[in-house]
Amino acid sequence: MYSTRKFLFVYAIQLAYLFPVAFSWSFVFLYLWQAGFSLMDMFLFKVVSYGAAVASLLLVRRYLTMPYMALDLIAFGIELFALPFIHDTPLLLLLGVFDGLTFPLFWVPYNTLYFKLGRDGGNAFHSGVMFLAAPMLGVVAPAVGGWVYEAWGYTAVYAVGGAVLTASGLYLLYRGGGDVFRVDPLRAWRSGAGVRLAVFIQGFWQSVDWVAAPVYMLYLLSSAGEYGAFLSAVALFGAFASLYLCRRSDASGSRGWYLNPPVVLTAAATIFCAFAPGLAWWFILRAAVSVAVAVSNPFMASVVVDRMGRTAEAMYLREIMLNLGRTVGMLAIIASEAAGGFMLSFALAGVLLLLYPLSVGRRRF
């Protein structure tokens, strides 16, 4: 039976996780850049993070929802507290391994718990509410974080994020409770035959959007305040558009009509990002991506649940394929940088994303 109180509690856990992402983690590349790390250092940091996430997912078969989420919140808090003390490449890569080994402990249990709370036949709307959290926080938190960064320095920004995460994790440990579930990787792989390639493509694109895009902004913006304000301005676009469309999709039973057009728009805008001539065009393209992703993300998640049925194994396989795609995407960014510039990776990611609508429902890979 659906419980509004339980839903609000679970949603609050997500907000406790995503606030430090928007307020603190948004500036990780800016900090690394100012600390003297090279582009290759940053890219390798994310390669080992996503690669370690795949390894973590393959090793962990039994999940305890509340304890595991609590442990990851605390681990993420430790990571933010540690960032100001990372000054050389080996330590940065070690931090990347730590990051990758821990964050699946949050997302597999959280997504499983969250989607099980969804009303019957409402997966897309329920997913839309979930994906609304990031843009909602993104409207304000990065701008405030940039102001704090300039006023008190990066240590203050990471201390605030680390404190929120650690306190939230300790509260979950104190509260206790939660569910226990197991996953069967082989069964998950087989049942996800129609969505594996699609989720891999999504992960590949995310690596470019989450890493190459903020790194490119380092060349366009000169301060933490400008950096945070830009992120907040972009987040304004499309923050609430997905809710109406997700409700319409659940009512009609159609996914493709609401999924494919924004995916194609995202792909086109991503391709044009490779050739953006300056800050004005970059802002327009990133705003277009923000709108399209706000609409398509809930459907990309709900399609996996719709096709696979078993919520826990659907979310487990989704995390594996996303992080596998992100790992390969990061290798593509590194190869693009070696070939002449990492901006080439935008064109690669955009072209690959155009194949997403065709890949949904295919039985191979």
Image (tube, rainbow, N blue to C red):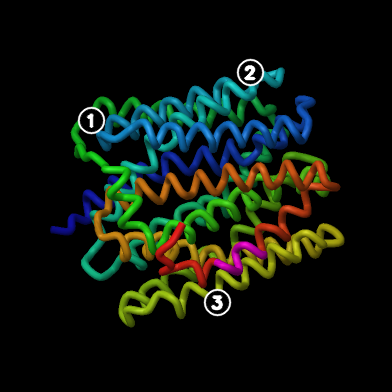
Secondary structure of the residue carrying numbered label 3: helix
Q: CA distance from mark 3 to mark 1?
A: 43 Å
Residue 196: in magenta span: no
* 10 Å crowding of disc 1: few (<14), some (14-19), many (20+): few
- Pointer 2: what residue? 91
- Image x and y of residue 60, in percent: 33, 32
Considering only order in the chain, which callout, 3 or 2, is on the residue closer to the N terminus? 2
* 10 Å crowding of disc 3: few (<14), some (14-19), many (20+): some
* Residue 60 in view: yes
Q: CA distance from mark 2 to mark 1?
A: 34 Å
The single residue placed furthest to the bottom in the displayed view is: 252
* Residue 128 in view: no
Extent of the magenta region: 351-355
Magenta stretch, main secondary structure, is: helix
* 10 Å crowding of disc 2: few (<14), some (14-19), many (20+): some
Residue type at mark 3 is Pro
Residue type at mark 2 is Leu
Q: Nearer the viewer, residue 175 or 258?
A: 258
